[in-house]
Image: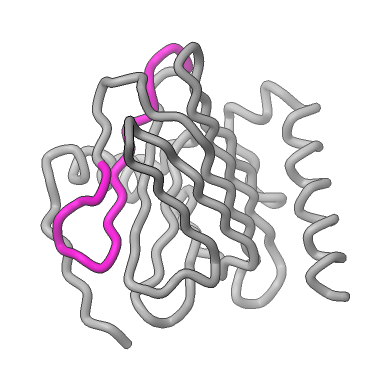
Amino acid sequence: MLNFSYKPTPLMEQIDRRLNKNHHPQAFAVADFGDGPMLTYRGRHSRVSLLSVSLVHGEQHIELSQLSKPPYLIALVQEKPDQPILTVLYHSDPYPVLEQNTERRLMGQVFAYGQSQDGSMRTVAHAVYLPEHSAVFAAADRCNSLLLESHPELCGHLCACGEIIDRLLGQ
C-alpha cells in the first residue's frame, strides 16, 4: 500500500465534511492509494469497476480511469443545484492538481461505477461540468439519494447503466 498523505485545503475540508459527516446526496469521492480505486458515497464504499474522469480547465486537461496509476483522489460536492460543483483533485502529490470553488469554467465529466465488497450493492455516480449548468447525480441501488428519489426516471437510468456495465465487465 502506498503512503499518500495529501495536504488538505479549506475547500477539501469542506467537501470532506459533506462526504463523511452529512452523507450529502450530491457528493462522492473516488480514491486509489494503492489498493485499487474505491468509490465513497453516502458513507458507503464500493470497489470501482469503471472510472472515467475527463476535465478541462483552461489549458489544463485531466484524464483518469480505473487503470490510472495511484495515488489519486477526486472529491466533489454540489451544495445546491444552481451552484457550481466544488471539486478537489490530487494526483501523486500532496497538493491539489485541480481545485475549483466558485468558478464555472471547468468542463467535462466524472463517471464512476462500483460494487460493494460482497457484491450486494451497486453505486453509480456521475458529475457533469458545463459552463451553463453543472450537476451531480449518484445512486446506490439499495439506498437512493433524496435527489434521485425525486427523479425516479434518472434513478432507474443510472441503475440500468450499472446493470449494463456489470454485463459488459462480466464478458
Which quadrant would the N terminus be assigned to in this image?
bottom left
Above/below status of 62 relative to 153: below
User: Which of these two is toward me, 81 or 73?
Assistant: 73
Furthest residue to the front? 59
Q: Residue at x 87, y 65 (%)?
A: 167
From the viewer's perspective, is 102 left or right of 166? Answer: left
Location of residue 3 in the rendering, given as x and y in whole percent from the top left corner: 22, 81
Magenta part of the protein: which range? 81-98
Location of residue 115 in the rendering, given as x and y in whole percent from the top left corner: 65, 66
Location of residue 29 in the rendering, given as x and y in whole percent from the top left corner: 42, 52
Above/below status of 13 relative to 104: below
Which quadrant would the C terminus be assigned to in this image?
bottom right
Q: Quadrant of residue 146?
A: top right
Is residue 118 highlighted in magenta? no
Q: Quadrant of residue 71?
A: bottom left
From the viewer's perspective, is 152 left or right of 67? Answer: right
